[in-house]
């Protein structure tokens, strides 16, 4: 709930996001779902879409690596949800509620970083909605 530090966007670190994508694919594999291609494909296309959106909405441009880094690091709660899917089914009410909470957590974290780094005050919900759609796709992979 604290304000995000805008200096995060100055560093493009893709090691963590790639490891989180591998961890998401591995936990999905342990849950019996072979979805590596979908995880990487949705990550790449989602990063392209958010990158285009941020460049259209902000006065300062943002690099693709920074967008991929922020979206990848905010994928960590989805990895935790996928880890829970190993031990019990998420196809009930509890799974739906936990997926919605994780989608909100991921999208609000990513949008908060984007808003603080790009000086886009008052536009957090406009950024959070496409992020929630992207993370919702990952949640659908995890739950079903």
Image (tube, helix red, strand yellow):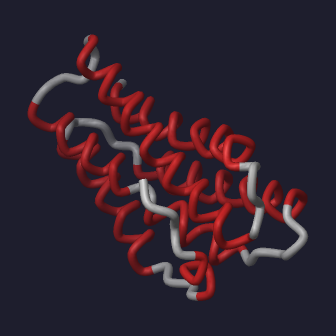
Front residue of 23/125: it is 125
Q: Residue at x 81, y 54 (%)?
A: 53
- Residue that protrudes farthest toward the top in the picture: 93
**Residue 85 horizontal side relative to residue 88, left or right:** right
Estimate the x, y position of residue 4 in percent, counting from the top left.
51, 67
Corner quadrant of residue 51? bottom right
> Please, is residue 97 above or below residue 106 in the view?
above
Estimate the x, y position of residue 71 in percent, counting from the top left.
54, 60
- Residue that protrudes farthest toward the bottom in the picture: 11
Corner quadrant of residue 89? top left
**Residue 59 horizontal side relative to residue 19, left or right:** right
Pick the quarter of the image with the C terminus: top left
Front residue of 142/119: it is 119
- Residue that protrudes farthest toward the left in the picture: 87
> Please, is residue 31 above or below residue 122 in the view?
above
Q: Residue at x 52, y 47 (%)?
A: 108
């Amino acid at each position: 709930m604290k304000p995000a530090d805008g200096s995060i966007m100055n560093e493009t670190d893709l090691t963590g996001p790639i490891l989180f994508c591998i961890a998401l694919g591995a936990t999905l594999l342990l849950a019996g779902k072979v979805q590596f291609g979908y995880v990487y494909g949705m990550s790449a296309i989602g990063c392209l879409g958010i990158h285009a959106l941020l460049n259209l909405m902000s006065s300062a441009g943002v690099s693709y690596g920074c967008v991929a880094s922020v979206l990848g690091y905010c994928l960590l709660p989805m990895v935790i949800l996928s880890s829970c899917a190993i031990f019990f089914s998420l196809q009930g009410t509890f799974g739906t509620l936990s997926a919605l909470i994780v989608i909100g957590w991921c999208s609000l974290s990513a949008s908060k970083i984007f808003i603080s780094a790009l000086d886009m005050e008052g536009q957090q919900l406009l950024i959070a909605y496409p992020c929630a759609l992207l993370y919702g796709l990952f949640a659908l992979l995890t739950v079903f």
